Image (cartoon, helix red, strand yellow):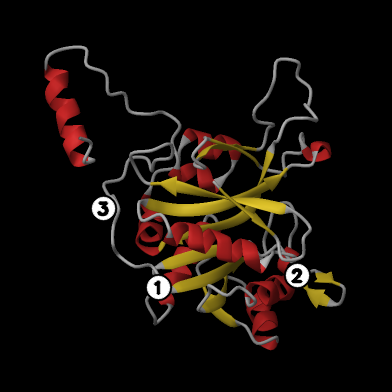
């Protein structure tokens, strides 16, 4: 887990990585795997800001004005400051949002209303872009103060981990927000890989109270994806955890881990094959 400081000095954030297979985070039930320690360079990066008008919690949110500017414009302006992005586009299915964004100079890609979440909308937008990209950064449209350094952080983290298919970021959780279901929490392992995301407080101690001395993590609304993996994402089956928590990032992780014990003679060949596949001496 990589620690960074924001440019404005307001807070620190940490970068997490997710693997497709073979580590603490794994993509479920899909035949696609990145080659272990791939040498494929991932230098071409596009930032996509998904924006929809119809929201169950806040209809028309991208167009709400914040100090005289639509929120989506403020998010776009911040994203444009990121040094790692070759291009920034806004992906929407709404003509009012498209007209607004074109008005302040953004590139807009129209996407279908059928997109179930921002990640699927990013994939639809990516397919329509003429240029090919290696990494796609999903930047939430309701983050008008997103730090460009956070965007750069998730990109560099993914570029630095050839076996990872996505990266994201967390920061310290304010204890006052610990029980707010709109503040998504995250737990990570000692290597900086995400274990689980939840709207509930995690970890949760037996007293049932928030521990003011525990370093809880708040998930920041940004993910970067390997472009090839993003193309497969819509075809992954929804998981029970994803549906229960209503968190799209849970679609690409599973918390059950493959066991590699030797219980019967036939397990020897299985574990040898596993070790050869991963170059374990």
Q: Nearer the viewer, residue 45 or 103?
A: 45
Q: Which residue was labeled with disc 2?
A: 71
Tell me the distance, in whole angstroms, between the alpha carbons under discs 2 and 3: 40 Å
Crowd class of label 3 (few under 14; some 14 to 19; many from 20; radius 10 Å): few
Query: Considering the image in quadrants, where does the C terminus appear?
Result: top left
* Label whose residue precedes the other's in the sequence (3 or 1): 3
**How many labels were placed on the picture?**
3
Q: Which residue was labeled with disc 3?
A: 35
Establish if 258 lies above or below 186. Answer: above
Q: Classify mark 2: helix, strand or loop.
A: helix
Tell me the distance, in whole angstroms, between the alpha carbons under discs 3 and 1: 18 Å
Name, please, the residue furthest toward the front.
Answer: 281
Is any part of residue 45 visible from this angle? yes
* Label whose residue precedes the other's in the sequence (2 or 3): 3
| Residue 185, x across and y down, in percent | 65, 39
* Label whose residue precedes the other's in the sequence (2 or 1): 2
> What residue do we see at 40% from left, 54% from top?
161
Crowd class of label 2 (few under 14; some 14 to 19; many from 20; radius 10 Å): many
| Residue 79, x across and y down, in percent | 63, 72
Q: Nearer the viewer, residue 72 or 146?
A: 146
Residue mark closest to the camera, 3 vs 1: 3
Q: Which residue was labeled with disc 1?
A: 133
């Amino acid at each position: 887990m990589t620690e960074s400081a924001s440019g404005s000095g307001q807070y620190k954030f940490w970068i997490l990585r997710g693997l497709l297979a073979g580590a603490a985070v794994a993509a479920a039930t899909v035949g696609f795997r990145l080659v272990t320690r791939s040498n494929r360079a991932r230098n071409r990066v596009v930032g996509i800001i998904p924006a929809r008008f119809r929201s169950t919690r806040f209809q028309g949110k991208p167009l709400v004005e914040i100090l005289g500017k639509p929120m989506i414009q403020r998010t776009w302006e911040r994203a444009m400051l990121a040094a790692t992005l070759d291009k920034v586009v806004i992906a929407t299915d709404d003509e009012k949002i498209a007209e607004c964004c074109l008005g302040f100079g953004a590139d807009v890609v129209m996407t279908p209303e059928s997109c179930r979440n921002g990640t699927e909308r990013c994939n639809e937008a990516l397919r329509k872009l003429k240029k090919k990209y290696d990494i796609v950064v999903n930047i939430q449209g309701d983050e008008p103060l997103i730090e460009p350094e956070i965007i750069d952080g998730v990109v560099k983290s993914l570029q630095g981990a050839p076996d990872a298919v996505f990266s994201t970021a967390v920061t310290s959780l304010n204890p006052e927000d610990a029980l707010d279901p709109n503040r998504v929490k995250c737990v990570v392992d000692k290597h900086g890989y995400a274990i689980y995301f939840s709207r509930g407080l995690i970890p949760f101690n037996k007293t049932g109270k928030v521990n003011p001395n525990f370093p809880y993590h708040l998930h920041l609304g940004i993910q970067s994806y390997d472009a090839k993996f993003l193309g497969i994402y819509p075809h992954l089956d929804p998981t029970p955890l994803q549906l229960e928590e209503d968190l799209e990032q849970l679609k690409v992780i599973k918390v059950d881990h493959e066991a590699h014990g030797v219980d019967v003679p036939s397990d020897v060949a299985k574990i040898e094959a596993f070790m050869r596949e991963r170059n374990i001496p």
